Amino acid sequence: MSRPDPRMRLAILGGKLTARASRSLRMGGGTTLPGDVARAIDPLVLRKLGASPGRGTVLVTGTNGKTTTSALLRQIAAAAGWRAGGNQSGSNLIYGLTAAAIAQADLRGRMELDWLVLEVDELSAAAAAREMQPQILVVLNAFRDQLDRSFEVDQVAARLGEAVAALPPTAAAVLNSDDPRIAALAGPPKALLFGIEDRGVDRGGLPESADRPVCPRCGGSLQFGAVYYGQCGDYRCPACGWSRPTPSLRVTRVLTAGLDHVELTLEGPGGGAGPLEVPLAGAHNAANVAAAALAALEMGATWDQIGRGLRAFRPAFGRSQVVRWGQGQVRLLLAKNPAGMQASLEAVLGGDSGPVLGLALNDGIADGTDISWIWDVEFERLAADGPRWIVVSGRRAAELGLRLRYAGVDGSRLLLRPAPEEALDELAERAAPGMPAPALLTYTAMLAWHRAVVGTGEAEPFWREG
């Protein structure tokens, strides 16, 4: 029997009381501040709580796709009969992870969970891995993100490499073989690779938003035989011969149909699953599904349980989430960096998304104050294609509208509506009957829009969802 830990108990109590006060006083969802308080009382509280779940902890990191992949994993865990918790609110820095762990624990530090599945900011992943010593670390990708915070994408990849190196010897790293920077991290400890092997989703070259990676062995230029999203695809180095490693779990078929669903076939260790319809869109989400499936296999799930979990999945907060506004509906799609915006834009243009599209750009700390990345997104495709109207919103709506005009979009198609309520009014009014209008939003813009919907009673606060 473990000895009582008064300091840990006091930290948990302090965190729980802070969360309750934060929500009672409407200061927020209590998804970060409880972690600050708890860590001030006991700096080792997260390390201690990381060992509490019955089967272990899974960390999911990378520039894009963390929230969706974590939610997929928790749904598969439920299908397998496991109790799984996590940070559904998306608060993924160390203080947010601590707050999420405290919310799952009792005052003795015990969790009635089999698995704790946490999404982790890529710049916090190494610290989280050192503290929590997870059984599994999922690394999705390394894209250029908030330039004022994340800096060069190679620096992000280096941080992710530190997270892999911090894993205990018995842990497994689930890595994306389609992203050269992530595939290069394979090595000790145990490395498991996932990837797409359907040339039908080859976009025909690297998008403008992609940072062309160099060979991790010799520094030469990589050649791509196929590109699925961002800089992810099939590649090789003609100088030294290094090439994309063969994944153990493969997405052999990807059939996208607008923003409502993607149909996938998975093949991997001991079998496969499919065709599966998952209510997500795009090749980037096919990769997220593959990552979740491979991690679930490592957790001990069967292919049948994986299939049932994926079929039952519903989108996470702000990730293809459909909300009602007035007499219409709007689909919220987080697009917080060039790769995410490009992937979501291609998904919108790849199907019948209706007559109107929303775009919202903010420049808060959580978004990145440097918005120059919008010039790397191929908005030129909207000039000759896409919805009849584009609703432009957010604190930097004027700059986004200017970018669209430079892209060749006719000004008569642009509706400048900076306030969330004004933008939602336009989208709901102009949407086709029964078809949610898509809206691509940066992070704090998405929070603002969601708050507006919560105010009508048509959605729950984000910290209650999932």
Image: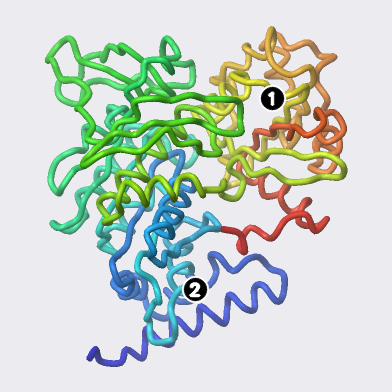
Asked if residue 299 is positioned above or below residue 430 in the image, the reply reads below
Count residues near mark 1 (Cα–Cα under 10 Å), then give few for <14, some for 14-19, many for 20+.
many
SS at circle 2: helix
**Real-space Cα separation, disc 1 to disc 2, in angstroms:** 39 Å
Point 45% across, 45% down: residue? 310
Point 38% across, 87% down: residue? 108
Q: Amino acid at mark 2?
A: Ala
SS at circle 1: loop
Asked if residue 271 is positioned above or below residue 78 in the image, the reply reads above
Q: Would you say the residues marked 1 and 2 are in contact, meaning their CB atoms lie under 8 Å apart?
A: no
User: Where is residue 208 shown, x and y percent of the image?
Assistant: 48, 16
**Front residue of this view, candidates 148 and 407:** 407
Q: Amino acid at mark 1?
A: Ser
Q: Quadrant of residue 142?
A: top left
Point 72% across, 70% down: residue? 26
Q: Which residue is mark 1?
A: 353
**Quadrant where the N terminus lies?**
bottom left
Q: Is residue 314 left or right of residue 393?
A: left
Point 43% across, 68% down: residue? 98
User: Where is residue 13 shown, x and y percent of the image?
Assistant: 49, 85
**Front residue of this view, candidates 2 and 465:** 465
Q: Quadrant of residue 40?
A: bottom left
Q: Which residue is mark 2?
A: 103
Count residues near mark 2 (Cα–Cα under 10 Å), then give few for <14, some for 14-19, many for 20+.
many
Looking at marks 1 and 2 on the same chain, the residue that comes earlier in the sequence is marked by 2
